[in-house]
């Protein structure tokens, strides 16, 4: 009799950037975030041999190969989230091991959420291997719980939610232990109209260290978090009404709040003010925790965004908003 073919699966999650609600989201306020079409794709293949094989050109200089039992031990460097995904499923129901190939369509330096994207894609690929599929919000909640365990309880979960659901969303953390987060899909800009563009600042920052620094300057409960949350609420209202001129003004207001928080270094504040002078630019601000990584530019067209990046000495990234979230991809020979 022919040997039964072991299952395989392929899942892809987009990058994301936070527009509004930075820091305030950790205080229970809304955030507004957008998925971008640079993606991380995880291919998972069940193996008869009891080994774990991980191949990731952007992360590893050569493929890693370990016995399945090693999943009970410490994670190899730079594989903490993937390792936790695998450890949570071992021993595998097919009785052998697993091979993962991780294809990252963007570098960590962009701040697109590589850790959460690889976690969402890996968990979904592991579900697919056993014929299961979670609702996107449930998958995001599972990914967030895993990320928080690896990071010692830190993380709002907005990134995993946006990557699982896709598009432009309003997000709020769960109101009670075990509850799901609030995730509302908002209208995306219409084709031919203003578009969100991502620009790299050339500076990489650590989000956990930025969060710690802000909380030292502005303790939990400070009024600034209500201001940030209110800005996110107004942005969601603007998106629902397709008021993109208003959204641009809110981005500018958000940048000024970043400066007040101390999360926009002077050089980047100057760069964004210069970028804002380009004709056709409606607004610009640093994303997420600030400090560096990527900035967002709302512009009427790509030429305006390119001019803004030229004026601000930023790098326009080759990625655009993505209405899709997690995707399960077919194999060419299927």
Image: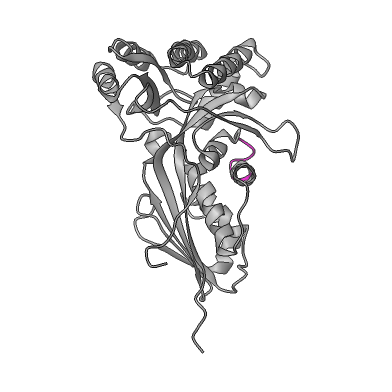
* Quadrant of the rendered image containing residue 198: top left
Q: Residue at 59% across / 41% down in the picture?
A: 151
* Quadrant of the rendered image containing residue 204: top left
Residue 59 percent across, percent down from the top left: 39, 50
Q: How many marks?
A: 0
Q: Residue at 49% across / 34% down in the picture?
A: 167
Q: Is residue 80 visible?
A: no
Residue 217 belongs to magenta span: no
Residue 52 percent across, percent down from the top left: 50, 66
Q: Say which of 272 and 281 sits in front.
A: 281
Q: Which residue, as the protein is rendered here, is positioned at the far bottom?
A: 1
Tell me where the magenta segment starts and ends, as one range: 149-154
Residue 301 percent across, percent down from the top left: 30, 22
Residue 57 percent across, percent down from the top left: 35, 54
When the figure is inspected, residue 282 is found, relative to residue 208, above or below; the finding is: above
Q: Say which of 220 and 256 sits in front.
A: 256
Q: Residue at 41% across / 44% down in the picture?
A: 39
The colour style of the image is: one colour
Residue 151 belongs to magenta span: yes
Q: Is residue 97 visible?
A: yes
Q: Residue at 39% across / 24% down in the picture?
A: 295
- For the C terminus, the image quarter is bottom left
* Quadrant of the rendered image containing residue 137: top right
When the figure is inspected, residue 91 is found, relative to residue 56, above or below; the finding is: below
Q: Which is the main secondary structure of the residues drawn in magenta?
A: loop
Q: Say which of 78 and 102 sits in front.
A: 102
Is 46 on the left or on the right of 136, as rendered?
left
């Amino acid at each position: 009799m022919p040997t039964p073919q072991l299952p395989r699966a392929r899942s892809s999650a987009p990058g994301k950037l936070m527009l509004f609600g930075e820091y305030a989201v950790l205080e229970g306020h809304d955030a507004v975030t957008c998925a971008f079409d640079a993606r991380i794709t995880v291919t998972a293949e069940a193996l008869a041999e009891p080994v774990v094989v991980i191949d990731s050109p952007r992360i590893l200089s050569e493929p890693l190969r370990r016995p399945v039992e090693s999943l009970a031990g410490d994670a190899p460097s730079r594989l903490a989230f993937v390792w936790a995904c695998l450890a949570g499923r071992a021993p595998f129901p097919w009785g052998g091991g697993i091979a993962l190939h991780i294809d990252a369509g963007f570098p960590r330096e962009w701040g697109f959420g590589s850790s959460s994207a690889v976690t969402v894609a890996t968990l979904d690929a592991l579900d697919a291997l056993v014929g299961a599929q979670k609702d996107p919000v449930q998958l995001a909640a599972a990914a967030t719980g895993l990320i928080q365990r690896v990071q010692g309880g830190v993380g709002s979960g907005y990134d995993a939610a946006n990557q699982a659901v896709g598009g432009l969303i309003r997000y709020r953390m769960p109101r009670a232990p075990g509850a799901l987060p609030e995730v509302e899909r908002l209208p995306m800009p219409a084709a031919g109209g203003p578009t969100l563009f991502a620009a790299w600042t050339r500076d990489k920052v650590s989000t956990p260290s930025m969060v710690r620094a802000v909380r030292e300057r502005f303790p939990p409960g400070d009024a600034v978090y209500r201001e940030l949350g209110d800005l996110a609420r107004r942005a969601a209202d603007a998106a629902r009404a397709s008021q993109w001129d208003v959204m641009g003004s809110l981005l500018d207001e958000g940048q000024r709040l970043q400066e007040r928080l101390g999360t926009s270094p002077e050089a980047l504040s100057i760069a964004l003010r210069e970028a804002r002078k380009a004709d056709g630019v409606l607004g610009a601000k640093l994303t997420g925790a600030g400090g560096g990584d990527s900035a967002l530019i709302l512009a009427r067209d790509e030429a305006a965004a390119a001019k803004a990046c030229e004026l601000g000495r930023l790098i326009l990234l080759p990625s655009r908003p993505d209405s899709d979230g997690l995707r399960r991809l077919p194999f060419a020979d299927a």
